[in-house]
Amino acid sequence: MTIEFDDADVARTVSSCPYDHGGIYKHRVVVLLTYIRDPEWVSNCRPIAELIADANPEILQNLLVELVDSHPEIADWVETCLTTTNDDIDTNSSVSASLDSIRRQANHVLPKPGQRGYTDPTLTSTNWSRKD
């Protein structure tokens, strides 16, 4: 839970709660009330941009790899951000993709053996061939 203040009010709040539908909801209220009553329970953290500004590049690289490993759904976003610039975008060129990235996504979203919705690909009537 992150709550940012400006000079007069709450400027922004961010929460990982899946029931966050905008506005000030119960978890934000709890943090604010806790801060009023027991401020030592709430830590004052510097923004991430400030924390990483002077960080060791090797540490940042390791953190990013760990983050992607623990959240594979962001791998493509990270890859796109690191490999694409506005100059790289050409609407007339062909599209290319990382096979590892596609494999990670497929493994993440497709049902695994024993899960509902899984179908054994060796039992399907459609045979796919691969060009080598």
Image: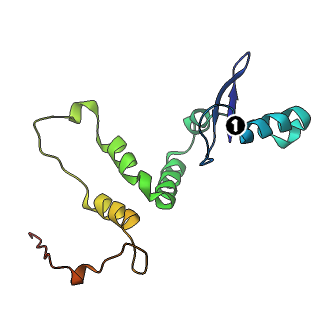
The spot of residue 90 in percent (x, y) is 16, 34
Q: Is residue 43 visible?
A: no
Residue 105 image position (x, y, % from top left): 35, 60
Nearest to the observer: residue 111 or residue 100: 111
Residue at x 69%, y 37% (from the top left corner): 25
Q: In which quadrant will I find the N terminus?
A: top right
Image coordinates of residue 92 in percent, x first then y, are 10, 36
Residue 31 at x, y percent in the picture: 78, 39
Q: Is residue 50 above or below residue 58?
A: above
Q: Is residue 80 visible?
A: yes
Q: Is residue 10 left or right of residue 83?
A: right
Check disc 1 and report the residue beneath it. Answer: 25
Residue that extends furthest to the bottom in the rendered view of this protein: 123
Task: Please tell me in which quadrant of the rendered image residue 126 appears.
Answer: bottom left
Name the image quarter holding residue 53: top right
Residue 130 in the figure: left or right of residue 36? left
Three-letter code for the amino acid on which mark 1 is drawn: Tyr
Extreme right residue here? Answer: 37
Quadrant placement of the C terminus: bottom left
Query: Looking at the picture, does residue 47 appear above or below residue 95?
Result: above
In the displayed structure, would residue 43 be above or below residue 115?
Answer: above
